[in-house]
Image: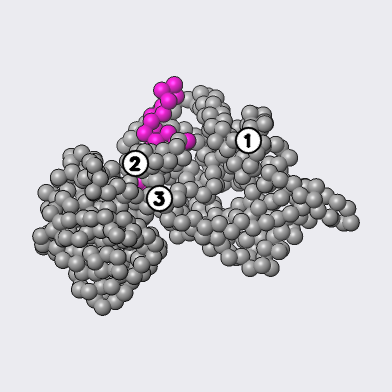
């Protein structure tokens, strides 16, 4: 196993980004809750520990603290924001409430060199960072020195080289800290001494062995949705156990244009993987009739999906395991240390177990990977780029992109408009520049004039966002002529839509999910 770093999570909504940045430089890492038992922390075998940020204050009553083992282990430690404050408080420094909170972009001046700083960080330089704190360190513990400061934080970066302890008051993991990833690389590679040799090829080989060991001679049923995650999981499982894998594709009739046919052609035709295709579109449409609340829609679709899946799974002989495309963010968010909204948002994942009635054990071959790493594994496995690079698509499909009641007419209108939208983006050569693009059928109708006649038809909204991590995003700056071409095609080709609008929306740090 490659050298590894452990992250202790104090509840920051961007803790996952720390892990992503470390993995991007070839260092394997995982996230545990801040109050994980010392035995779990020691058993992970890390070469360094990162203390994440979080919403708490060390000045509050019973603030969250890391186990004593962290500072008794002799391992290098990096504290980020709250992690820096709790490090100082535990080691003999002082923290106070700042006279003025420091949120958003700030400039840090580097005063002295230290092992944490790698190019382009250098003494005398200034770096743009992202601050998010209301407390600040005013007295350092013995052995520490301040090596960088900002206008509001005299101890923006602190260092105790003798013990390998470092702290930063800002968030190096977010893209708004322009060279923040270099600090994390400096900690993992230079301070903790990690080789940086974790690769997707190594993960593939390791995971194939794990699957074979876990499954033995039993069969596996994989729920195939047509999305990236389940497709990569199915391809990896098939490589590991061959025809003992059976994929069940529940087609709820709410997919994008052509996706059902693509799934069947690729997995049944090209890869020759045993595949059960259940066309249940009529069943789902009937269950959604008259339902307007988006969360109720989710529950109906999720519950019905399981019922239909179980109907098909009962006919498959010799199966002892159910495979699903659980990702590492699902695992992290299912054990939220702050009790925040992520648990509700990810409730459609059976992370950690299945209903007893299924009489199947769970195999989750992707549970250690982030979304971009799943794409890399898909390429490693030879899946076509059209599938691997596909924009994220929610499990409930088009149903939650139709605010209000879902009808067959609305689904067909949205599917047609969405297909035109994506087709024009691909024709323009910008599909891969965009993190996610989709159309929404708004719950309003407008009066228009087409061909000298009045129309009273639906309005379609278009959304497209760019992102490097899927957690922060901004709208894509479409050229006006392209937007005009897309709108013209939708209005001309989709009878029932007479107006198209573009949704200019940003997703700042701290929010959770796009639909």
The x, y position of residue 428, in whole percent, is 63, 65
Q: Are marks 2 and 3 in contact (CB under 8 Å)?
A: no
Tag 2: Cα neighbours inside 10 Å, few (<14), some, or many (≥20)?
some
Residue 220 at x, y percent in the picture: 43, 33
Image coordinates of residue 126 in percent, x first then y, are: 31, 74
Horizontal side, residue 513 vs residue 210: left or right: right
User: Quick check: is 395 in the magenta stretch?
Assistant: no
Asked which colour scheme the image uses, the reply is one colour
| 197 horizontally vs 448: left or right | left
Looking at the image, tell me whether mark 2 or mark 3 is earlier in sequence order: 2
Q: Nearer the viewer, residue 334 or 387?
A: 334
Mark 3–mark 1 CB contact (< 8 Å): no
User: Which residue lies most toward the top here?
Assistant: 357
Examine the structure image and report whether residue 354 is included in the region drawn in magenta. Answer: yes
Q: Is residue 276 visible?
A: no
> SS for tag 2?
loop
Query: Which one is earlier in the sequence, the residue at label 3 or at label 1?
Result: 1
Alpha-carbon span between mark 2 and mark 3: 21 Å
Which residue is under mark 2?
Answer: 338
How would you classify the magenta stretch by its main secondary structure? loop
Residue 370 numbered tag: 3
Residue at 67%, 31% in the rendered image = 290
Q: Is residue 130 above or below residue 65?
A: below
Q: Nearer the viewer, mark 3 or mark 1?
A: 1
The magenta region covers 348-369
Find the residue positioned furthest to the bottom: 124
Q: Residues within 10 Å of mark 1 (few under 14, many from 20)?
A: some
What element does badge 1 sit on? loop
Q: CA distance from mark 3 to mark 1?
A: 32 Å
Dot 1 or dot 2, earlier in sequence: 1
Question: Which residue is labeled 1 in the image?
Answer: 292
Where is 122 relative to 96, above or below? below
């Amino acid at each position: 196993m490659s050298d590894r770093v452990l992250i202790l999570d104090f509840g920051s909504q961007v803790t996952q980004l720390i892990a992503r940045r470390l993995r991007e430089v070839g260092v394997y890492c995982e996230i545990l809750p801040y109050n994980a038992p010392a035995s779990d922390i020691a058993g992970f075998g890390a070469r360094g520990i990162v203390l994440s940020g979080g919403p708490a204050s060390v000045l509050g009553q019973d603030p969250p603290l890391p186990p004593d083992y962290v500072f008794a282990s002799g391992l290098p430690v990096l504290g980020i924001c709250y992690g820096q404050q709790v490090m100082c408080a535990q080691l003999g420094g002082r923290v106070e409430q700042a006279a003025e909170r420091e949120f958003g972009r700030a400039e840090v001046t580097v005063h002295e060199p230290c092992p944490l700083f790698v190019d382009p960080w250098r003494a005398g330089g200034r770096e743009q960072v992202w601050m998010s704190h209301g407390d600040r360190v005013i007295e350092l513990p013995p052995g520490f020195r301040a090596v960088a400061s900002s206008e509001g934080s005299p101890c923006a970066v602190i260092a105790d080289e003798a013990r390998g302890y470092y702290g930063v008051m800002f968030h190096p993991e977010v893209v708004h800290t322009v060279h923040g990833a270099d600090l994390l690389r400096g900690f993992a590679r230079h301070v903790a001494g990690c080789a940086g040799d974790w690769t997707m090829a190594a993960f593939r080989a390791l995971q194939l062995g794990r699957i074979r060991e876990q499954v033995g001679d039993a069969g596996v049923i994989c729920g195939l949705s047509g999305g990236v995650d389940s497709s990569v999981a199915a391809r990896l499982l098939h490589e590991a156990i061959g025809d003992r894998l059976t994929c069940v594709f529940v087609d709820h009739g709410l997919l994008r244009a052509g996706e059902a046919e693509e799934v069947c052609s690729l997995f049944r035709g090209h890869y020759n993987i045993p595949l059960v295709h259940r066309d249940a579109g009529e069943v789902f449409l009937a269950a959604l009739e008259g339902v307007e609340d988006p969360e109720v829609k989710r529950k109906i679709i999720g519950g019905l999906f399981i019922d239909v899946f179980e109907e098909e799974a009962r006919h498959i002989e010799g199966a002892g395991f159910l495979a699903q495309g659980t990702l590492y963010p699902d695992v992290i968010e299912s054990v939220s240390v702050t009790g925040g909204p992520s648990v509700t948002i990810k409730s459609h994942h059976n992370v950690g177990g299945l209903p007893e009635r299924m009489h199947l054990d769970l195999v989750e071959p992707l549970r250690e990977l982030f979304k971009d790493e799943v794409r890399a594994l898909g390429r490693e496995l030879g899946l076509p780029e059209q599938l691997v690079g596909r924009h994220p698509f929610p499990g409930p499909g088009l149903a939650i992109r139709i605010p209000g009641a879902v009808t067959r007419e609305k689904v067909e209108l949205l599917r047609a408009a969405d297909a035109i939208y994506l087709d024009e983006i691909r024709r323009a050569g910008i599909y891969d520049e965009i993190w996610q693009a989709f159309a929404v059928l708004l719950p309003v109708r407008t009066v228009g004039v087409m061909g000298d006649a009045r129309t009273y038809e639906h309005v379609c909204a278009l959304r497209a966002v760019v992102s490097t991590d899927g957690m922060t995003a901004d709208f894509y700056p479409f050229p006006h002529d392209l937007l005009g071409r897309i709108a013209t095609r939708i209005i001309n080709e989709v009878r029932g839509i007479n107006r198209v609008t573009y949704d200019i929306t940003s997703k700042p740090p701290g929010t959770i999910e796009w639909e």
